[in-house]
Amino acid sequence: MTDLIELIHRLGSPQVLVIGDVMLDRYIWGDAERISQEAPVILLRADRREERLGGASSVATMLQALGARTQLVGVVGPDRNGEQARHMLDTLGIDADGVLTATDRPTTVKERYMGRAQARHPQQMIRVDYENRAPLPADLEHRLIAILAAQIPRADIVLISDYDKGVCTPGLLQAAIATAHAHGRRILADPTRGGDYSKYRGCSSMTPNRLEAGLATQRTIRTPDEALDAAAELRDRLQLEAGIVTLDKDGMALAHRDGRRQLFPTRPRQVYDITGAGDMVMATLGLALAAGADYDAAIRLANIAGGLEVEKIGVATVTREEILTDLLQAPFRSTERLPSAAKVVGRAQLLSELEARRRNGQTIAFTNGCFDVLHAGHVQYLAEARRQANCLVVAVNSDESVRRLKGPTRPLNPVEARAMVLAGLQDVDYVTIFAEATPAALIEAIRPDVLVKGADYHKEDVVGAAFVESYGGRVHLAEFRSGFSTSQLIERMKAA
């Protein structure tokens, strides 16, 4: 998982253009109390109504939550639902200048009724759709093509989210694909269900699910080899850079133009709702590729994001911090030391938990280091750091950060292993990872009561010392214990 942690830290804020069907997902929540006296149906006593963006606008929402700069091209109807969708896009900071009003159709709405049995976990009871699936009128199609001609050159990647609601016409998609090729931009498609995929010809890649790929290739996909064969057939037939088939709990299959054929499994999850999983895979895959990742790493990251999404109810977003926390806890899942796993956290979760501790009157100590090969000197140092406050946070350098500090042969242990060992120490309350050259930004976010470094430092050389003292915190230089050195230990191990 080390390379994925590094990828998270270098994702940046790519410009992602999303083309497709703008929708509104409406949820009606309530208690499913009894059978109606009027008919043999469940009576839902509604208590909450919620609206989220769906379809292509769901992909845009997920991208925005993942830190992308997002543009959306599509249509809404001349109605209150369309106004609501525009307001939500604007609130999220998504560029919706390319979303036009179509006078021949309503805004697409999917209305889901969510019932709780005896106030327990909610389940979807029924879905009601309001839509017009006819292709866009020619004049509106031409206006969208003109918008794409202006926006695609400014994007780092283009994503097509086709829900078969009339926006993704063959003419519009072929114009978008030609423009993307002309400007050297990758263009990915999440296709609609159907047998004729010719309108996606020339895309860089596409992500049909098991059923969609089976219909498009006239196959029944049961095994990994069958999925790889379908991905390869779609790649060759549609002139793709890479054919990808998503396989729900079995992960994803990749058939690349360079000859790679690989299955990327995903770990078992507690599935609450599969709604939105495909959108999350598309958003994460596009973001990672836009940031310069290869398909291998991008698919693995998308597997994790899609898995986190199905653990939530409805179409929900996932943040980088959630993905990072999931990656950091991965080494612990095969062990029984779950309390230690909970210590390894991303930045957002760390700040939330420290805030709760402060409300209870606790003080926070902070230290950082590479902790490549943990030895007795480290253990004594961390014990002294813990005595300075009620809670100790240890920030550990990412692998790339260690290489910048120590050279290309370090670290000996990947960041997951270093975090696991630190989390196993009783004196350590939290472990978090930073990829920056220094922990300055992390210190400013945490605002520790005590900043701890070794006595081999002078206080004026300690990163963050002046900042901590500026608000009344203090700097503690822990006792230096001679005879303990990671570099010397490594040399003795080599000699032995």
Image (tube, grey):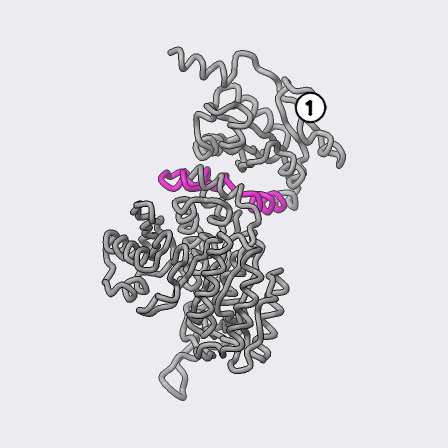
Percent position of residue 54, x then y: 49, 67
Which residue appears at 50% of the width and 64% of the height? 19
Q: Which residue is mark 1?
A: 461
Which is nearer the eye, 20 or 447?
20
The residue depicted at 44 percent of the width and 52 percent of the height is 285
Q: Is residue 334 visible?
A: yes
In-image side of 309 versus 427 (left or right): left
Residue 246 seen from this side: no
Residue 209 coordinates in the image, percent (x, y): 34, 61
Residue 50 in the image: above or below residue 473? below
Quadrant (top left, top right, bottom left, bottom right) of the C terminus: top left
Dominant secondary structure of the residues highlighted in magenta in the image: helix
Q: Is residue 92 magenta?
A: no
- Total numbered labels placed on residues in the image: 1
Badge 1: how crowded within 10 Å, few (<14), some, or many (20+)? few
137 in relation to 364, above or below: below
